[in-house]
Amino acid sequence: MQQPPKVIKDESGIPLTADAVAIYLTHLEPVGNGNEFAFTELNMHSLKLEDISIIKNYANLRHINFSDNRITDISPLSDTSLTNILTLDLSKNKITTLEPLTKRTFPFLQLLIVSENRIKQIPQGAFAHPFLKWLNLDGNEIADLGEAIADPEIPIQFLELRSNKLKDCYGLNQNVSELDLAGNLIENIRGLSICANLTRLDLSYNKIKTIEEIKQTICYRYTIKGLKYIHLSMELKYLVTRGNPFEEEVGGAETARTEILIRLPALKKLNGKRVTDEELRAAAEVQEQRDEEEKQKMLAGTQGSEEAEEED
């Protein structure tokens, strides 16, 4: 039986030739009308690849893994022959632009991983794929989302933006249910108000300075009418906020935990720790005491006004 050609990995990487690709093709499956078979998965991670031009010759691929290489140019992926891709992993490369992804629509793409690259901006249309549900942009240099993700026609449910340079949360997608924003430079989180379906949210290790930013944004959002408030807390079950300056503002992590639970009693876990019934009762008691104090202040103010009127 003829052996496949041996691939030698050196400092210059391997050339992406047909012989090289053949070694890493797997999952022989029926394609087209089912009468033909082709390999549908290509896993070429950690091979020091630079040039992926030949990929356009493999129209039946459904799963592509080019992670941990030296790729800078992803324009070959914009070839119209690549219509069957379901998952695409481009993580840990040297990609600086996603512009090639705007040239065409991937009709079946569901998962796109572009983490740990050198991306600073997201061009409009880069993620306009009708079935894209999972997008990972962790570990890039993105400072502004713009409008590239915001289109409600993009059905993104899982969005990962950890370790970028974001300063706010504007430009998010209303369909997102799980969102990771840890390790950014975020001070203003009001852009989260559009995400009414959030069940998981990680805001850890950002620059959020006040507890009010958490209370007002995560617990409520404005509708178009402006004055009406809608609770987000019914959906949100898992929240991470550790490592933000507001913890010191309120007197430490435990006090911050109580303040958050007052507004978000439906949480199941906060900062990785399960929320107990005892904590919820304690938070409710704190709020009841505050309500009573506020009531007493109002009564005192009313009495003072009445006494002043009597003197007049």
Image (cartoon, rainbow, N blue to C red):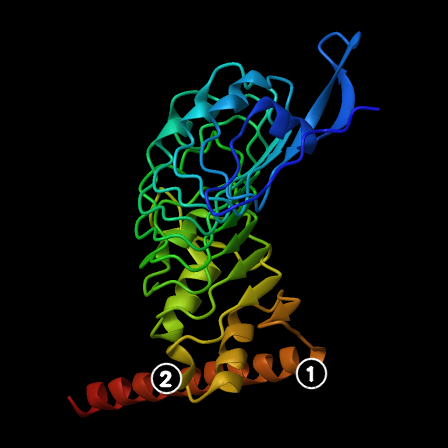
Mark 2, residues whose alpha carbon is within 10 Å: few (<14), some, or many (≥20)? some
Q: Position of residue 193 (x, y in %)?
A: 42, 52
Location of the N terminus (image quadrant): top right
Residue drawn where x is 40% and y is 27% of the image: 75
In terms of depth relative to the viewer, which is nearer, 295 or 54?
54
The residue indicated by pointer 2 is 249
Label 1 with label 2: CB-CB less than 8 Å: no
Q: Quadrant of residue 183?
A: bottom left
Q: Position of residue 102 (x, y in %)?
A: 38, 26
Residue drawn where x is 53% and y is 85% of the image: 254
Task: Describe residue 24's horizontal placement relative to residue 17 as left or right.
Answer: right
Return the disc, 1 or 2, that comes first in the chain's sequence.
2
Amino acid at circle 2: Glu
Task: Describe residue 307's horizontal placement relative to residue 231 as left or right.
Answer: left
Q: Is residue 305 visible?
A: yes
Q: Secondary structure at mark 1?
A: helix
Residue ranking furthest to the right: 1
Q: Secondary structure at mark 2?
A: helix
Task: Describe residue 82's horizontal placement relative to residue 40 as left or right.
Answer: left
Residue drawn where x is 48% and y is 43% of the image: 114
Q: Position of residue 128 (x, y in %)?
A: 45, 28
The residue indicated by pointer 1 is 278
Mark 1, residues whose alpha carbon is within 10 Å: few (<14), some, or many (≥20)? few
Q: Position of residue 225 (x, y in %)?
A: 35, 43
Q: Is residue 111 visible?
A: no
Q: Total label count?
A: 2
In terms of depth relative to the viewer, which is nearer, 209 or 287?
209
